[in-house]
Amino acid sequence: MSIDLSQFIPSFLEESFEGLELMESGLLDLQRGDNETIHSIFRAAHSIKGGAGTFGFDNVTEFTHLVETLLDEMRDGRREVSSKDTEILLDSVDCMRLLIEAARDDEEYDQDKVEQTSKRLAETLGDEQTSADESRSKTDVEANNVCGYTINFIPEHSLAKTGNDPIFLFSALAELGQLTLSADTQDLPALKDIDAQELYLSWQLTLYTEADEAEIIEIFEWVEDECLLELVPIKAPSTTSANTSSTESPSSPSSTLTNNEQQTEPDSSQKSTQDIEQPPKAELVIDSTAEDNNITSKTKTKTKTKDKGKAEVGSIRVGVDKVDSLINLVGELVITQSMLSELGNDFEMEKVERLTSGLEQLLQNTKELQESVMRIRMLPISFAFNRFPRLVHDLAIKTGKEMELVIKGEQTELDKTVMEQIGDPLVHLVRNAADHGIELGDVRVANGKPRKGTISLDAYHQGGNIVIEINDDGAGINRETVLAKAVEKGLIEANAILTDSQVYDLLFEPGFSTAAEVTDISGRGVGMDVVKRNIQSLGGRIQVKSTLGKGSSFKVHLPLTLAILDGQLVKVGTETYIIPLIAIVESLQIDNKLINRVSGDMVLYRLRDDNVPILPIYQLFNLATECTEIDKALLVVVEADGQKIGLMVDDLLAQQQVVIKSLKDNYQQVAGISGATILGDGSVAMILDIPGIIHMALEQAQQAQRVKTDGNSSVTAEVCL
Amino acid sequence: MTKVLVVDDSNSIRDMVSFTLKSAGYQTVEAKDGLDGLSKAKSSNFDLVISDVNMPNMDGISLCTELRKLGDFKFTPILMLTTESSTDMKMRGKSAGATGWLVKPFNPEKLLATIKRVVK
């Protein structure tokens, strides 16, 4: 029977990556002699090795074997835990990750790195480098004319106590060939002396088989030190003649097969042994497993290429409690459904009360079900935070600065997709904090700060959002340096007057980098703008605060999920649009006195200290509406990128959660629209893309401005965009 | 039906062993470490126990020792699933009452062939 285990590869990979993470975090806070940590690191390595062997990822197995050997020495206390070893092990973890990823994607990996690390590992391990297979010895033999064996099997009385049962051994033997056996009962004591848990019999078996000695001995592998076992080859008839002498030779059986002297005595008379050569046995066992491995790895590679296409499908590990609560809810839903359908069968008006209560129940069920399903996608943010201890550890070595990382709120839950996409921006922010934020130890001491800098990561919920803070107690952002740089890059005018937050916003401009020299850690000039863009594409925003000399704080606000959105339904003509609630600053009735018409088509609204451009949605999407008068309409003030704009709508409808359907997947991307949803009445409503709309409005205004300027000499610079 | 208790802290190994056994018609119960295995062993009878050696909470050797103390498991075959093919480890298993050992890397055909030496 052939059993295909390739279906377990994804779960093995997932487990391996988890194991690697565990090893890494374990290594990072490995205290001298901290046994439990070493044990858990060892176990992780051990499991990876075992699994990799099974799936034929041989280079993973080989490499991990070295790691395991080193860890084993630490575990047994044969080796002191030194920081040098820890560094090597950390590098090894990286190599294992490389190897496993290469095995997963069936791709090449950085062989130099792996070779170097494995050399360092081997050096650390010293000369005792295990080369287990060296002991392979020459093969020879296999007497061609052997057609079977006579087997003397004399078990110890206690054999059954280790759970072995001779009958199974015999039936395994019988599978090799034709077996006859006779039991020897001479050891059997008188009935009154019999201990039912002891085994008193011994057997003489004759097996005619083509199998070799090794195969037979392998069957007895588990009992070989609890019995006396003798194998005598039976020669094929043609050569039997000269064989009598060897059958009678009293040579003692080789020591691995005998263990119990007393047991041998009663039978010594009938004992007849052929010299059993051990080396061939070892050789044959190794050969057969090697062959098996080859076969498995071959089939593996085949299935791997086949599966490659669907390997992209990610998986989530979900707690059983979450699944249980889902099943409960579905159960309730079914009950409600059956109640409602029974009600519908013979509905009369007096049952309307029961109908309403049933529908309410349905609403409740649906809501709870929705929440539970969403919870399945929620993972603790520790998944994203996990890689930071290592990152900061490495950064501290590279920069020569002393720093520590404090992580808080790692149990805060976040949607899996959001989590996957926020990882890189966070890495960038932490790198920046380490590279630009934290000062060198001496500088810190001179400034009256502790020598060791602190970077902290914190995550918490705030309203319907999750906030991730990256704080450092470093030098802070130097306003003047930023301004000078921005002028140099031509981002602002030399005499521009900017508020602090406008200055910090400059950091996110493309091509902006204040690092005096480009290091390999940060300051490559790409980065902060990408960070901002990534966060925005997740529907989030980033805030910067900084005090010169005290440190900086980056706050990332993200929606909890990308699948559902809290929306404000608005009416424009006959259409309904949805504005994400998070973008709305306020909604108000337009006061005619505050409207300010400037040049072009631009209309500004005086909102306290701000001038907010008004953008009529009916114009934006070319809709027919009766409500074209500004003073009759409502204004929804929205904000994105620190820019406010007033959307003119006919009416405000309900606020509700809407499920986001991608327009791109179902139709095509439309400017100003981020997606669509289906409303309760079955109609489709578009979700407005606020940053996109603001961008469009600004461009339009600029264009209008340019046309105006070109065609007319009267220049109005009042537009404060 | 032959009922097997599979004890391993690695999900994938446990799944694979279990899958292999099930496809050969065995019934399996899984446990994630020695402690879990022991409590499952106490609540039910098994014809065979296959256990990893290195596990958190309770390792395979201790599990074996504990199982042998239970009346129901006095003669039940217990196989250790291990990458450590060293004689030292085998001896420790034996003295704890293990019936035999299965050496990882794990090969499904071999697993099925070998366990026939101890169960139907």
Image: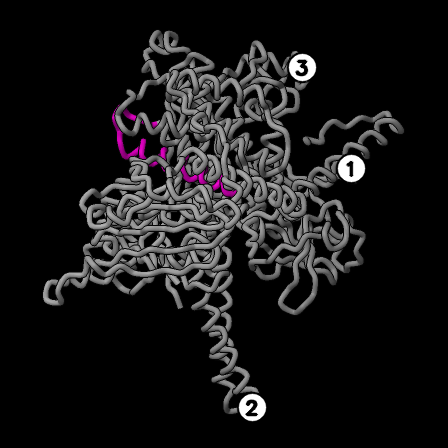
Question: What SS does tag 1 mark?
Answer: helix
Residue position marked by numbered label 2 in the rendering: A347
Image-based side of A143 in relation to A686, left or right: left
Quarter containing the C terminus of chain A: top right
Does the magenta run of residues contain A52?
A: yes
- Image coordinates of residue A514 in percent, x first then y, are 57, 15
Magenta-colored span:
A29-55
**Colour setup of the view:** one colour
The kind of residue tagged 3 is Lys
Give the label on residue A700, or none. Answer: 1
User: Rounded to the nearest whole Å, what is the CA distance between mark 3 and mark 2?
Assistant: 75 Å
Chain of the residue under label 1:
A
**Is any part of residue A206 visible from this angle?**
yes
Considering every residue shown, the one lying at the far left of the view is A192
Q: Secondary structure at mark 3?
A: loop
Looking at the rendered structure, the kind of residue marked 1 is Gln
Q: CA distance from mark 2 to mark 1?
A: 58 Å
Say above or below: A54 vs A621: above
- Quadrant assignment, res A446: top left
Query: Is the residue A381 above or below the residue A326 in the image?
Result: above
Q: Secondary structure at mark 2?
A: loop
Q: Relative to the observer, which residue lies in front, A49 or A321? A: A49
Determine the chain carrying the residue at label 2.
Answer: A
- Residue with the mark numbered 3: A489
Say above or below: A215 vs A477.
Answer: below
Tell me the mark number nearer the camera, choosing from 3 and 2.
Answer: 2
Q: CA distance from mark 1 to mark 3?
A: 26 Å
Q: Is residue A127 magenta?
A: no
